[in-house]
Amino acid sequence: MFYIIGGVATLLLILVIIVFKEKPKYPPSRAQSLSYALTSPDASYLGSIARLFKNLNFVLLVITYETPRGGGGEQHQQSAHCCVRGSSLRGRW
């Protein structure tokens, strides 16, 4: 069961990386058009993901979210969601 869920999640991740384009053909608004004009050519989707995984706070959040707590199952999901919510609230303050 866990291997099936892991396989589906991995497949979805690969599809997101392959299918999502760097930016749309036509900007959705004037502000976004200006943002495209001002961004550096170095900015890329994969570069952003690489920077994200180099961020220690993000890595710690991922580890905290994925670390099983207690008996697993529903209890694990509830505690993981609490960790994510607490982290996001702390980031807003």
Image (tube, helix red, strand yellow):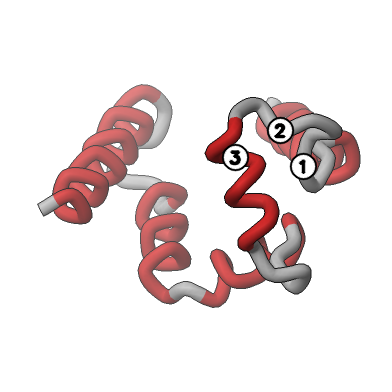
Q: Are marks 2 and 1 in contact (CB under 8 Å)?
A: yes
Q: Residue at x 77, y 69 (%)?
A: 41
Q: Residue 27: give its label.
A: 2
Q: Which residue is mark 1?
A: 23
Quadrant (top left/top right/bottom left/bottom right) for the N terminus: top right
Q: Residue at x 64, y 63 (%)?
A: 39
Between the C-alphas of marks 3 and 1, the distance is 10 Å
Task: Work out whether residue 87 or residue 8 is closer to the camera in this orientation and state it.
Answer: 87
Number of labels in the image equals: 3
Residue 30 at x, y percent in the picture: 59, 34
Residue 74 at x, y percent in the picture: 36, 23
Of circles 3 and 1, which is in front?
Answer: 3
Q: Amino acid at mark 2?
A: Pro
Residue 47 vs residue 29: left or right?
right
Q: Residue 32: give its label.
A: 3
Q: Residue at x 60, y 28 (%)?
A: 29
